């Protein structure tokens, strides 16, 4: 019977790996109050952009202003006490030089001065604390990004370092995508790079995305880092890619499929998937035309897929004729009549083959 064949030619083949991933913000800040008080004003638009330093909330500051004023007065009192103690010490020191006062009196004056200076420093620290608390009544954005929904309203009581965040800011341009792969695949990729089959170790890997609706994301990212720890429970490791996100198509938490481009295999064969089957052991097999014109069953080594083709790195050679149609009705060593086949873009044989009398019409494509 006739079988459709194509001639195999080795060629450089792009090498990539498909991985699942989740979009995560490149930066996240949860807004929490640093002082106790009543929320007096919310100064941002929920879901809008904020810049670092923008005012987000204002807390009632009346008691903090009073505390600042009291601390300022205590500091002034301490400064006056220090000035008086300094003057007393200077006079006592002058008199002590002429033995007009005892050494004990000079020591007491020195001790009083040091105590006054210490109290002044303590008062200055209290004033700084009061100033910080007063400043903290105005809550500002620590980073720029997109701010979410406010979890408090005007009039709500908030407490210092409370558990629940008042709002969350996320930086989503650029954005990260965390990719998960098995440790076995990590070892295989490293072996390929070491053997010169993939990209060079110092070349950045390019990453492309496909969204949940099947649409391809129009920005390409780069592989930023890989977690150097394999999970003890799942046996996987995490890689992180970074993407520009100017139109905010990528949203934190979104599921995506990523293609990490590792480079290219110097020599490999693109074998149509329709020509590959599996034996009982699970090995990939194909039929080729032997030197004596018979069908020969051959085990092959695959290394991923490209479109409708398997990437084959072993088991076949340049110039061999691969059977892509009619192999369903033959066995190893069968007499065949090889006819050059024409495949379309989808890997489907376009022409029809003459079939043996024992074959049911329509069994072949």
Image: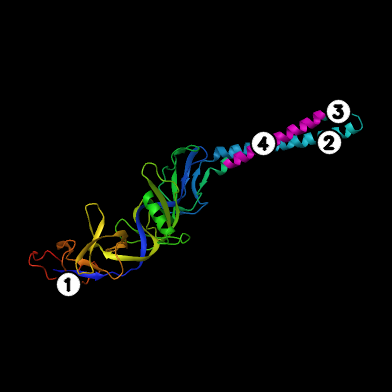
**Residue tagged by mark 1?**
351
Gap between marks 2 and 4, in whole Å?
24 Å
Q: Earlier in the sequence, mark 2 or mark 4?
A: 2
Q: Mark 4 or mark 3, which is nearer the start of the sequence?
A: 3
Quarter of the rendering occupied by the N terminus: bottom left
Q: Which mark is residue 90?
A: 2
Report how far apart the C-alphas of labels 2 and 1 lie in the structure. 114 Å
Pinpoint residue 89: horizontal percent, then vertical percent.
82, 34
**What residue is drawn where x is 50% and y is 41%?**
33
Q: In 3D space, how far apart are the residues under numbered discs 4 and 1 (Cα atoms)?
A: 95 Å
- Mark 4 lies on residue: 123
Q: Quadrant of the C terminus?
A: bottom left
In the picture, residue 302 is in which quadrant? bottom left
Q: CA distance from mark 1 to mark 3?
A: 120 Å
Of the two numbered discs 3 and 2 on the same chain, state the one appearing first in sequence.
2
Crowd around label 2: few <14 · some 14–19 · many ≥20 (10 Å): some
Q: Magenta span covers which residues? A: 107-132
Q: CA distance from mark 3 to mark 2?
A: 14 Å
Q: Which label lies toward us, 2 or 1?
A: 1
Q: Nearer the viewer, mark 4 or mark 1?
A: 1
Tell whether label 1 touches label 2 (CB within 8 Å).
Answer: no
What secondary structure predominates along the stretch shown in magenta? helix
- Residue under circle 3? 103
Disc 3 from disc 4: Cα separation: 30 Å
Helix or strand or loop: what does disc 2 sit on? helix
Q: Position of residue 78 (x, y in %)?
A: 71, 35
């Amino acid at each position: 019977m006739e079988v459709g064949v194509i001639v195999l030619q080795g060629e450089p083949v792009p090498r990539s790996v498909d991985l699942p991933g989740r979009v995560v913000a490149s930066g996240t800040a949860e807004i929490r109050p640093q002082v106790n008080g009543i929320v007096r004003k919310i100064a941002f638009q929920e879901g809008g952009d904020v810049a670092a330093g923008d005012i987000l909330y204002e807390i009632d500051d009346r008691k903090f202003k009073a505390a600042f004023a009291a601390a300022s007065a205590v500091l002034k009192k301490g400064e006056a006490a220090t000035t008086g103690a300094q003057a007393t010490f200077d006079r006592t020191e002058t008199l002590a030089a002429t033995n007009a006062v005892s050494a004990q009196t000079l020591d007491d004056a020195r001790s009083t001065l040091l105590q006054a200076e210490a109290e002044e420093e303590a008062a200055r620290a209290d004033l700084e604390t009061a100033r910080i608390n007063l400043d903290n009544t105005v809550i500002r954005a620590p980073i720029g990004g997109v701010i979410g929904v406010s979890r408090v309203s005007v009039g709500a009581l908030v407490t210092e370092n409370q558990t629940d965040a008042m709002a969350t800011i996320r930086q989503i341009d650029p954005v990260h995508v965390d990719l998960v792969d098995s440790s076995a695949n990590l070892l295989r990729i490293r072996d390929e790079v070491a053997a010169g089959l993939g990209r060079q170790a110092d070349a950045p890997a390019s990453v492309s995305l496909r969204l949940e609706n099947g649409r391809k994301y129009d920005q390409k990212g780069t592989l930023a880092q890989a977690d150097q720890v394999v999970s003890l429970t799942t046996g996987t490791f995490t890689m992180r890619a970074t993407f520009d996100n100017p139109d905010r198509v990528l949203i934190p938490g979104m599921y995506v499929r990523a293609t990490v481009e590792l480079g290219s295999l110097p020599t490999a064969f693109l074998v149509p998937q329709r020509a590959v089957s599996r034996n009982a052991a699970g090995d990939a097999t194909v039929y080729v035309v032997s030197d004596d014109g018979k069908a020969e069953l051959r085990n092959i080594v695959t290394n991923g897929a490209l479109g409708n083709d398997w990437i084959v790195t072993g088991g076949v050679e340049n110039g061999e004729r691969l059977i892509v149609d009619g192999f369903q009705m033959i066995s190893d060593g069968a007499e065949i009549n090889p006819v050059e086949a024409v495949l379309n873009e989808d890997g489907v044989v376009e022409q029809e083959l003459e079939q043996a009398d024992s074959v049911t019409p329509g069994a072949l494509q």
